Image (spheres, coloured by chain):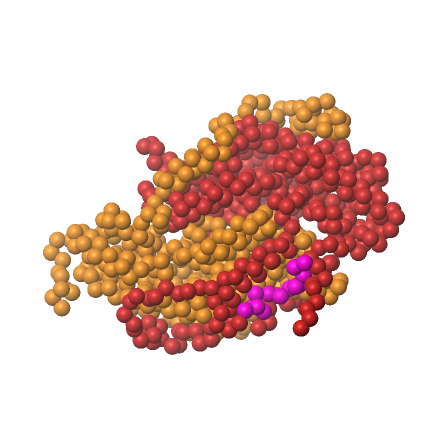
Amino acid sequence: MLAAIGVGSLEELFERQIPSELRLREALDLPPGKPEQEVFEHLRALAGRNRSAEEQVSFLGAGMYDHYVPAVVDMLTERSEFLTPYTPYQPEVAQGGLQVMFEYQTAISELTALPVSNASVYEGASAVAAAAYMAKLHNGRSAIVVSEALHPHSIETLRTYARGYGMEVREVPTREGVTDAQAWSRAIDADTSAAIFAQPNFLGAVEDAAALSEAAGSAGGKDGPVVVAQVDPITLGVLAPPGACGVDVAVGEGQPLGNRLDFGGPSFGLLAAREEYLRRMPGRIAGATTDLDGRRGFVLTLQTREQHIRRERATSNICTAQALNALAGVVYLGWLGRRGIVELGELLLARTHYARELLAAIDGVEKLHEQPVVREFALRLDADVDAVRRRCLHAGINPGLDMHAFSGRERDRGGLLVALTERRTRAEIDRFAEVLAAAIEAERPAGAPAEKALA
Amino acid sequence: MSVAPPERPGSESGRTIFQKGAPGRRAFVCPAAEVPEVDPRELLPDRLRRTDPPALPEVSEPELVRHYVGLSKRNYDLDSGFYPLGSCTMKHNPRLHERAAALPGHARLHPLQDAEHAQGALELMWRLQGALAEISGLPHVSLQPCAGSQGELAGVLLTRAYHDDRGEQRHKVLTPDTAHGTNPATVTMAGLEVVKLETNEAGGVDLEDLRRKADRDIACLMLTNPNTLGIFDQNIAEIAEIVHGVGATLYYDGANLNAIMGLTRPGDMGFDIVHFNLHKSFTQPHGGGGPGSGPIAVSERISPFLPVPVVSRAADGSFALDSDRPKSIGRLRAFHGNYGTFVRAYAYICSLGADGLRDASETAVLNANYLLARMQEHGLAEYLPLAFGELCMHEFVLSGGPMKRRLQIKTLDLAKRLLDFGFHPPTVYFPLLVEEALMVEPTETETKETLDAFAAAVATIVAEAREDPEVAAGAPYTTPVRRLDEASAAKRPVVREAL
């Protein structure tokens, strides 16, 4: 090979290209390579030092959820033909991936009741920032109004991005578990580019999405701001979809749809919108067309939006997104099907309601708000949340998120955020109630009244 | 009843899952609720409820499996053949990584699990941070960015934060005309202005142009080295001096890191910020367009501004997520990065070790130069000359200009004809400054036999075009579909199935 190249040694190849003073003369300070089985054992040992949802009964959610991932998702996402190609730059040999994108877009469009979806963005929090950037490109206004009831990570991410593209972020407070409607209307004015709320919100509460959208429209002057909802897609079998509630752009974390927890990623972000936003969307979009012989086929379309064509005038810098995770999402939605998405939603509603009432009946526990919930709810504990959590963990149950420790917001003081999936059985919920009751009893301040027992 | 066979296997072109199945058909069996029944309106008032269910597919599991297995067969993939897509580093994806990432201790670990119950994951991240710091020669690492593009955004935001902290308002970023499109797009998203830099005759940064444009308004120069021409910029030390001389930062786009692991380091070249593409240099499978992962490494002066969280190690050897960084640019995403990609990248680094990583880069460069030599042999070089230089690093860029003029076939035609020969074509029409560009990156995991076969296929196509250019112009012929009408797709976009 060296002879064909016309160099005398491998070294010559580098000598002639990299200035000598920049060459690394010692080996990198990394351990020597290892055989496959040793690497596997090392990674297994590391895995063994984590306590996964396999090893405890977990009610932890707050943005990612321990749903059952059907075997068919694993089988299809592991196929070489989906796992190992890259972005479909050559559509003639990427019809599989392109059609998957097209089907994914259709499924997300159906779920959200919005006519157009892209082929995925990174994940749920940065999807909010991406939607706000779309709004900026759309109307050129200067402020973003965001409900404080969004997931704290989404608000923090939005702030990071907004500092970059130069927009002011105004937060609207929470009242009784949902976005304060009056403060929402007051915060929105003619400078408001985007008005953003979450459905359900961080506290698990279902917002009155239609009312928030309408209020945004009438408060925002001519044309109103772009109304953005951050949705949990698994709830959209039972919750009124954003498209039916006056929402312009829906974004969300796709993990509940057939993606594993993976300690937080990779998953995918969904992004769907009304038709008029199609050419402002970030990322890949697959479109249907025909080939020379008239057969139906798919291509990446509207590429003049994208960074590789439009460069500094692109609608986004996003390039590689989450194709494989979006595949898991669309396979999962096909597996659930039209009826399954509703049945699963009803199951979550029923078990969540049961768990909420059962837990809120414990002495020293109350609901943090009374709003309807679908799959997650917030409780307020009359005891040190961290200490209660430790007792539960010791009993093999992860009771959920210590809200105040996580968000630092006064609203969340004493709060415990409890999430349900179809994996949490009634027996597990009942056991959780026993464990929580015992933990609270042990941790309650001395002399606290046992009101519920008396009542 | 007579049924005609399809024209070619698997050619039921374009029927989606939404056009299959029948009402009531299903794969999912819902578990029983097991809890007392409650009036649905008590659970959720009607005005908050969905009235029409989404029109998701109604198919059985066998239909679902056949449909997607059928679609998979309409993809070309790296496990099936050569995939020399320039700047994408399509190297083999070891299956060990998939097995390790699927271990429940990794795959079913909740991101908000208490740190004491996620010590294995945090240790893995900490070790990966350390390895990436060592490979880049820059001491501080954040694993947060979701992909290279977000790593770039982080880098530009870091640069802004750094200048702001020093009380300086700088609003311009230099990018060479050979830069990846993400660079200028990122600059705009980060609220700064792009200033283009010209390329010199050797394919590197035009130093005169740089000196002219480098002033106190410049926040940063974003550079890829080796650049998208596969050329290592020999003037890099001087470039760094000029950029640092005006107080700006130097950003390294790590898309081409596969050329230099263990051979030279961005930190030693004077770069302040680097992003890595774990799906390129570190074997995270490309997944048909993601997931990616774009960690960044930075110098001491940039480190106070790193995004949160970073993984830290306490004196007692325990690991924690550190979000208490007052000067941080903030958070780029929820949770702590694409952990699943960290498992794979870390497994790769463990498997190869220091020597293996250097071998990988050396072999990548050897393979690229060998393939370049084969493609510059008599009969090819006249039509597809190397755009710049003589040797290359991990990739090279040919110009299809002479081929187009002499044989009446474009780079696109060559690419499409390669599909009939069972190869994925190289990146085409990038970088923009090369006429009819063909950007070839073979990677280290290909054999000499494969490289020879690819060069031979290109030679055959060129020879064929000398006889009859129409063959390539009409290609491909053997793929699931032929050339697709992209213009009408963009003119009248159909981006979902009508139901």
Q: Residue at x 72, y 50 (%)?
A: B419
- Judging depth in this view, the residue of B376 and B26 nearest the camera is B26
Q: Position of residue A391 (x, y in %)?
A: 23, 49
Which residue is more in the foreground, A136 or A368?
A368
Q: Is residue A169 magenta?
A: no
Which chain is displayed in orange in the rendered image? Answer: A
Residue A13 seen: yes
Image spot of residue A232 (x, y percent): 43, 62
Which quadrant holds residue B451?
top right
Asked whether residue B264 appears in the rendered view, the answer is no
Residue at 40% from the left image edge and 57% from the top image edge: A67
Residue A365 left/right relative to B169 = left
Q: With respect to residue A12, does B316 lie above or below?
A: below
Residue at image location 54% in from the left, 47% down from the top: B292
Chain the render paints red: B
- All told, the count of numbered labels is 0
Quadrant where the C terminus of chain B is found in the figure = bottom right
Foreground pick, A341 / B45: A341
Q: Position of residue A334 (x, y in %)?
A: 50, 63
First to last magenta residue range: B9-21
Residue A216, image x, y percentages? 46, 71
Task: Answer left or right for A289 relative to B347.
Answer: right
Would you place residue A230 above or below residue B164 in this image? below
Quadrant where the N terminus of chain B sits is bottom right
